[in-house]
Image: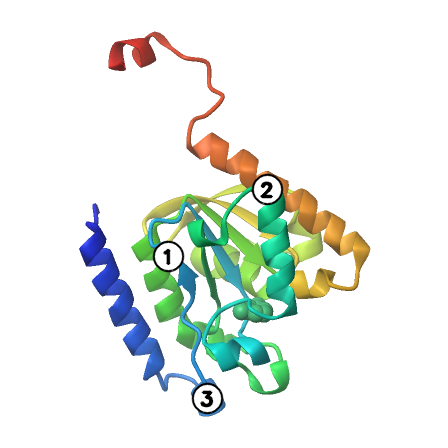
């Protein structure tokens, strides 16, 4: 479906309003601020993280704490501006004491996660950590999730049950890499795959065919 920018903006605002008043799972009881996500509604790249932490809960914005600083640096290294991408999490409210989100909570929040993916229709989805990877692979992609360390390091073509075919790049969560140089190296190498995937979806680097000349 082709969206005009005004439609997109108003659909986004509706989703934000629903998240602000959401009581679908128990996490709403603990939140200071829900964290719907942020970024460009026309983003080609969609980042899916795990859950807001303390800073995110205070600010109502995703990835603004220490893991966010690393995410910013990783994006900078591949020359992609944070404002060009869209970032959200599998749950939009902070779990108490930063515990892992539970399956029921991820499932309850999927109504918003799926609406955001359908609204933005990204070309590339980068999943950060096990929960996000499993969500895209198993829940939306009907594929087996074998755990992040087995699956990372490659670009996957996945048909999501949202009538959308995307390239998926599963990688570690930046928080896990903060004090682990090996995981950080793996993250840096996976981020280079984003550039490759993007140039593929944009059709860059392809040899021009006769059709290209006719088109111009
Ligand atoms: N970790 C996440 O998974 N998401 C955030 O927004 C912040 C930290």
164 relative position to 57: left or right:
left
Mark 1 and 3 residues: CB-CB less than 8 Å, in contact? no
Crowding at dot 2, Cα within 10 Å, few <14 / some 14-19 / many 20+, comes out as some
Q: Are marks 2 and 3 in contact (CB under 8 Å)?
A: no
Per the image, the residue denoted by label 2 is: 78
Q: Nearer the viewer, residue 200 or 40?
A: 40
Q: Nearer the viewer, mark 2 or mark 3?
A: 2
Image quadrant containing the C terminus? top left
Characterize the local packing of mark 3: few (<14), some (14-19) or many (20 or more) Cα atoms within 10 angstroms: some
Q: Is mark 2 within 8 Å of ligand 1?
A: no
Camera-side residue of 145 and 215 = 215
Whether 179 is drawn above or below 16: the answer is: above
Mark 1, residue position: 117
Query: What kind of element bears circle 3?
Result: helix
Task: Measure the C-alpha gap from mark 1 to mark 3.
Answer: 23 Å
Q: Which residue is mark 3?
A: 26
Residue shown at the point (42%, 66%) measured from the top left: 37
Mark with earlier residue (1, 3) = 3
Residue 173 in view = no
Q: Position of residue 197 (x, y in %)?
A: 52, 37
x and y percent of residue 63 in the render? 55, 66
* Separation of residues labelled 1 and 2 (CA atoms): 23 Å
């Amino acid at each position: 479906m082709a969206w005009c920018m005004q439609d997109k903006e108003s659909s986004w605002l509706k989703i934000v309003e629903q998240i602000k008043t959401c009581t679908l799972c128990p996490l709403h009881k603990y939140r200071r601020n829900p964290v719907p996500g942020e970024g460009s509604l026309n983003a080609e790249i969609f980042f899916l993280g795990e859950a807001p932490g303390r800073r995110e809960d205070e600010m109502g914005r995703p990835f603004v704490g220490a893991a966010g600083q690393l995410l910013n640096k990783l994006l900078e290294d591949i020359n992609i501006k944070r404002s060009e991408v869209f970032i959200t999490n599998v749950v939009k409210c902070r779990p108490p004491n930063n515990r892992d989100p539970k399956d029921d909570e991820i499932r309850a929040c999927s109504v918003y996660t799926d609406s955001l993916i359908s609204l933005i229709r990204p070309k590339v989805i980068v999943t950060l950590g096990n929960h996000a990877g499993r969500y895209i692979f198993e829940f939306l992609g009907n594929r087996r999730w074998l755990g992040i360390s087995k699956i990372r390091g490659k670009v996957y073509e996945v048909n999501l049950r949202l009538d959308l075919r995307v390239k998926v790049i599963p990688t570690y969560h930046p928080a896990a890499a903060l004090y682990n140089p090996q995981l950080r190296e793996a993250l840096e190498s996976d981020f280079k795959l984003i550039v490759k995937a993007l140039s593929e979806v944009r059709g860059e680097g392809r040899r021009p065919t006769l059709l290209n000349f006719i088109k111009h």
